[in-house]
Amino acid sequence: MSKLIIAGGYPLHGKVKISGAKNASLAILCGALLAEDEVVLENVPDISDVRIMLEIMGTMGAKVRWLANDILSLKAPEQVTEEPPYNLVKQLRASNLLLGPMLARYKKSQISLPGGCNIGVRPMDLHFKGLVALGAEINLDRGSVQATTQGLHGTRVYLDFPSVGATENIMMAACLARGQTVIENVAKEPEIVDLANFLNSLGAKIRGAGTDLIKIQGVPKLTGGRYSIIPDRIEAGTFMVAAAATRGDILLENVIPRHLEPLSAKLRESNVEVLEGEDSVHVKAIGIEAKNIDIKTMPYPGFPTDMQSQMMSFLSTVPGTSIIVENIFENRFRVADELKRMGANIKVEGRMAVIEGVTELQGAQVKASDLRAGAALVIAGLMAKGETEISNVHFVDRGYTNIEQKLTSLGARIRRE
Ligand SMILES: CC(=O)N[C@H]1[C@@H](OP(=O)(O)OP(=O)(O)OC[C@H]2O[C@@H](n3ccc(=O)[nH]c3=O)[C@H](O)[C@@H]2O)O[C@H](CO)[C@@H](O)[C@@H]1O
Ligand SMILES: C=C(OP(=O)(O)O)C(=O)O
């Protein structure tokens, strides 16, 4: 089990290139199952979630080849005979995104439920609601979802909550359904728009992605194509917060500044300078003053839950009283206990955390409980006095390409053991 060891106290300086988006890549890889010909994807991040997804797709008969560090070719199988193995599926939450495309392309899908995870229960009722409305029959049998259909047909579905995964699964399934599907109250995350753009580039007819109503006119088949995945707004956000937390000055390249707005707004409220270029963002944090920052996580364009833990680390040394309300995942405050071990003053009450800024954090041995908790501890380690040792680094590797190399190039003292 590897650990990250960080000697803290060095402000980040310099330039960093952001990789492709984890959440867009995972959905797009699943969407590639709908394509009858080869699909080439560019700007794919080299992270463990992507590698596990490719392994799962390999067991289903997909042919995958890496053409460069961040470019891969994928050819979906004509048929899928075997259920993807549980030992792989359980490692990856996003394996639930295979359901919709498998059902649409192969008329059946049998896949283990990935289960809840450290950040919450994560039910799939909305995914099922949409797929059943499209004409699927769904049964749960010993932890597996068995979905079959005689043929999907267009429908109208209202999502009770704008779930990212349910929007993606239903949208992918509807691409090959007969007739028109209308999905209301959908998620508007940039990754949904990226998935829709990708599918449209293969011949799908999706309109409205990025608004709260998506219309899909089913087509008989999708072809192959070449597509470049959007940059990862959460990786970018993590580096922005790391720069703010260490009172540094960095330039992020390969970003879409509009996707970072909800975070940039909160950083600016904390007196951090955030200057947007066309595909870059400059973050400069020199004069951080006493501030009381309030954050409520919300579906996009609200403040992303995936940036909440990292902000908690930063706010733990911003003078003043800050409040974070977590509205998306019920268990996302576990990192507070680790930050407290480093000297942070945080009180958690249900879905609310109250953070009294302290002058500094001290290095300690801490443990990541999930991906973004791990990122938050890296940020805490970078600003703490002394050495921080972070265990459970496999969580961090789920979502960050070459994190030590990127941070080292910005002047951090970080190594893996
Ligand atoms: C691989 C991927 O893209 N993961 C992202 C995706 O997760 P994911 O797609 O799982 O997140 P959802 O948007 O579906 O979940 C949001 C909320 O809806 C609830 N819910 C969801 C589905 C359902 O059928 N029933 C239900 O009640 C969940 O428990 C949660 O409370 O969006 C989250 C919210 O932006 C991000 O934090 C994750 O990084
Ligand atoms: C919660 C996250 O991802 P996943 O949905 O893949 O668990 C995340 O990226 O922070």
Image (cartoon, rainbow, N blue to C red):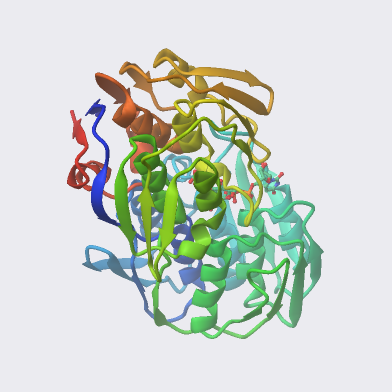
Q: Is residue 16 left or right of residue 204?
A: left
Q: Residue at x 48, y 69 (%)?
A: 33
Q: Is residue 7 left or right of residue 265?
A: left
Question: Is residue 399 something that shows in the picture?
Answer: no
Say which of 222 and 333 sits in front: 333
Question: Is residue 276 something that shows in the picture?
Answer: yes
Q: Is residue 356 left or right of residue 383?
A: right
Q: Quadrant of residue 151?
A: bottom right
Image quarter hosting the C terminus? top left
Say which of 235 and 95 sits in front: 235
- Picture layout, residue 153 above or below residue 380: below
Say which of 177 and 264 sits in front: 264
> Looking at the picture, how far across and down is residue 289, in whole percent?
47, 33
> Looking at the picture, how far across and down is residue 306, in whole percent?
52, 44
Image quarter hosting the N terminus? top left
Q: Residue at x 63, y 57 (%)?
A: 301
Q: Residue at x 62, y 30 (%)?
A: 323
